[in-house]
Amino acid sequence: MKNIVEGTLSYKTREEFEKNLREMHLKFLELEECRLDVRSVQKRYEQLIQSAPDAMIFVNKEAKIVRINAQLGSLFGYTEEELIGSDLDTLIPERYRIRHRGNVSKYFEQPRVRPMGMDLMIYGLRKDGSEFPADISLSPLETEDGRLAVGAVRDITERKKAEEDKQRLQEQLAQAEKLSALGRIAANVADEIRNPLTSIGGFARRLHKIADSEREKEYTAYVISEVSRLESLLRGILAFSRSRSPLLEEHSIQGILDEALESWGERCRQQSISVYKEYREDAIVRVDREQVREAVECLIANAVDAMPGGGTLSVVTDREIVNRLPGVRVRIQDTGEGIAAVKLGKVFEPFFTTKVSPRGAGLGLSIAKKIIEEEGGTINIDSIKGAGTTVTLLFPSVGTK
């Protein structure tokens, strides 16, 4: 038994014990190296997250925020301490929260990589209560604590604005093409009608001269009046539809305004309209003098028609910056009845008129707008019902007189 017992006992020699210690020490060094490698990888991973150009957020299946980077905190206006552990609803506008919770649950049931640009309408809610349109990419991440959803968030306010501007330009282009086609048709029709209409007017004037009875004179006068109105309409259609090649030369804006006002001087006197001029800036503009004068006369005509019982017509010029360059601003103001707000957005549309009198064809402002924009200027109208109307023109200037 002693031998058997002694046979089961084993004793390590000193050399074997030291060898085991050395092996244990090596294992310890390997573990320490692995630990340092892990810490290094974690540090690099953290640096990658923090240096990512997009705002990054990590969410668990309970829709709790477990991690963010500095960009996300800056985007939403929170610190990391404020968001870690809070519900994802914190960053979602209230009207979208119920639907968003359902989307989070579905994502964890079927996790997948979802890139940006999926045309999903997503909005973020900042700490200050403001909202912004966002685009987000999602990807699943397996961790020791379970599966997480990693989101990269972008503020796409500028992108949406650019898209809206593009859409608006496309709509304007389509509208311009429609108006161009309509203009060509109208011009062709006007050309066909003009000659017979002129003949009708000529014969009506002759008949008026030889008419024997008052009733005959009344009828012929009515025909002449209607022919004159139609001729005016045709001139407006042709003026609006014709292609223009502006003869750009340097002119004094004051000279153009004075000529336009002079042509309406007698009409203003007849209607007891006083004319007020204040040229604070007599700029030199590079325009087609005759076309700009035509546009200004259209605007003066509208102002005069708005004051059948008299009033004040004001023409004021001053300095303005146009596209970061020196320019001149021209304001043509009347003291008429003004234009209702619901109609103000349509005043530049062809054939739209606010006049009660059937004399107007509704082309004056359309023609003026077309000319001014072709000359490199802009036109804007402001009006208050019962307090008059102001039309503002802006032109780049090439100097002062």
Image (cartoon, grey):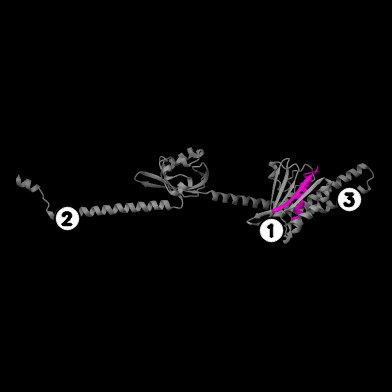
> Residue at (17%, 55%) from the top-left corner?
19
Q: Residue, x 40% and y 53% (percent of image)?
A: 48
Q: Residue 159, image x and y in percent? A: 54, 51
Amino acid under label 2?
Lys
- Left or right of residue 292: residue 45: left
Q: Position of residue 327 (x, y in %)?
A: 67, 56
Amino acid type at circle 3 is: Phe
How busy is the neighbourhood of tag 2: few (under 14 within 10 Å), some, or many (20 plus)? few
Between 231 and 81, the residue placed more toward the observer is: 81
Could you tell me residue 322's position as x and y percent?
Answer: 65, 55
Quick one: label 2 or label 3, which is nearer the N terminus? Answer: 2
Task: Tell me what residue is drawn at x 36 percent, y 46 percent.
Answer: 143
- The residue under label 3 is 203
Magenta segment boundaries in residue numbering: 292-318
Residue at 38 percent of width and 44 percent of height: 147
Q: Which residue was labeled with disc 2?
A: 19
From the viewer's perspective, tell me whether residue 370 is left or right of residue 262.
Answer: left
Q: In the picture shown, does residue 87 fall above or below 36?
A: above
Using a 10 Å C-alpha cutoff, classify the residue at mark 3 as few (fewer than 14 neighbours), some (14 to 19) or many (20 or more): some
Q: Earlier in the sequence, mark 2 or mark 1?
A: 2
Of helix, strand and loop, which one carries label 2?
helix
Give the distance between the C-alpha atoms of the residues marked 2 and 3, in whole angstroms.
131 Å
Image quarter hosting the N terminus: top left
Residue matched to label 1: 397
Contact (Cβ within 8 Å) of mark 2 with mark 3: no
Left or right, 356 with reference to 202: left
User: In the picture, which quadrant includes the C terminus?
Assistant: bottom right
Q: Residue 305: which quarter of the image?
A: top right
Calculate the distance from the C-alpha at mark 3 to the C-alpha at mark 1.
50 Å
